[in-house]
Amino acid sequence: MTAGVGAAKGPTLRREISAFFHRHSRVRLSLLLSAPLAWLGLAYLGSLAALIASAFWSTDTFTGDLVKTFTWANFHDLLTIDVYRTIALRSVWVAAAVTLIDLAIAFPMAFAMAKLASPRAQRWLVILVLTPLWASYLVKAYAWRVMLSSGGILGWGYGLTATIATLAYLWLPYMILPIYAGLERMPNALLDAAGDLGARGWRTFRTVVWPLTFPAVVAGSIFTFSLSLGDYITVKIVGGKSQLIGNVVYDNIGAANNLPFAAAVATVPVVIMLVYLAAVRRTGALENL
């Protein structure tokens, strides 16, 4: 009898717990998200807080030890020394150029994939777009180094042009896929209706296609812009003597052994991305992703 009562209590308790979580969906969602949010808070937000805090420290000139005393010296040097302002502006320009090039290439490709290709062809085209992501970042970067060398296929040499071309290739799938997803969700009936009302290709694009896919374009630009802004490996491989923000951070961590100044420089792309996200949020694009 006792065993039977215990066996009956087990399923009853499980049903009560299940019913409780069914009635309280927010509690269920909170428990499901607690582990990833805790990891995000510790690994990402914690490291970001440590980065910002160390940016206000300094390094002892003689011993090289960290001096954990609050100072604005790193940011003062960052704002007053011309070379750092030039590098920051160059980094933003390179990231913007990469984003625009990827957009110009990705939009017609994504449109052809979503609206012109058959369902079977769409699956194969998505696989082809994803295929370069399976290869190593370094393999692709060094392949471009070979092509851009004086004896290579392109022979452009190394510098900012080579850096922009290589980054545009590396991040192109991150622009194609969001735009493809946005175009795939757009009903074909809207294009047919625009044509029936007499709208030509450019007007249909301007009044129908672009407004509906703008959130997807914003999503792709966030990837390409942020990844290009913080990149330093490609510049090391094909950039020649050019430097971007990532190179300054890398050099101050390694050769210069000035971690506080490296942290101060690393806050620049963080601030730029926050400003960029705030700007696109005002357009309403993030709410429609």
Image (cartoon, rainbow, N blue to C red):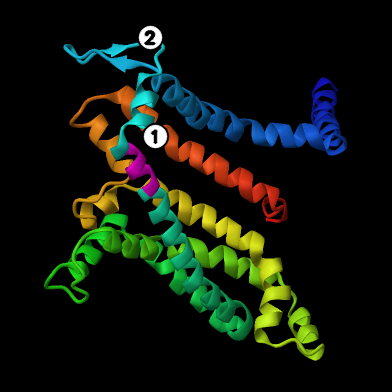
Residue identified by numbered label 2: 69
Q: Tell me if mark 1 has few (under 14), some (14-19) or many (20+) residues whose alpha carbon lies within 10 angstroms of its own.
A: many
Q: Looking at the image, is 97 positioned above or below residue 123?
A: above
Dominant SS in magenta: helix
Q: Secondary structure at mark 1?
A: helix
Q: Which residue carries the number 1 mark?
A: 266
Indicate the quadrant containing the C terminus: top left, top right, bottom left or bottom right.
bottom right
Q: Is residue 140 visible?
A: no
- Left or right of 32? Residue 79 is left
Q: Identify the residue at horizontal 47%, vertical 53% (top origin).
A: 225
Establish if 27 lies above or below 197: above
Label 1 is placed on what type of residue? Ala
Q: Is residue 48 magenta?
A: no
Quick one: label 2 or label 1, which is nearer the N terminus? 2
Quarter of the image for the N terminus: give it: top right
> x, y (%) of residue 18?
81, 36
Residue at 51% in and 26% down: 42
To which quarter of the image does residue 209 belong? bottom right
Give SS at disc 2.
loop
- Image spot of residue 218 (x, y percent): 59, 57
Residue 10 in picture, x, y percent from top left: 79, 29
Q: Is residue 188 left or right of residue 91?
A: right
Q: Which region of the structure is painted magenta?
A: 84-89
Residue 99 pos. (x, y %)? 47, 60
Above or below for 116 versus 245? below
Q: Nearer the viewer, residue 253 or 271?
A: 271
Q: Say above or below: 28 vs 201.
A: above
The amino acid type, in three-letter code, at marker 2 is Thr
- Residue at 62% x, 47% y is 279
The residue sitting at 42% across, 61% down in the picture is 97
184 sits left or right of 58 in the view:
right
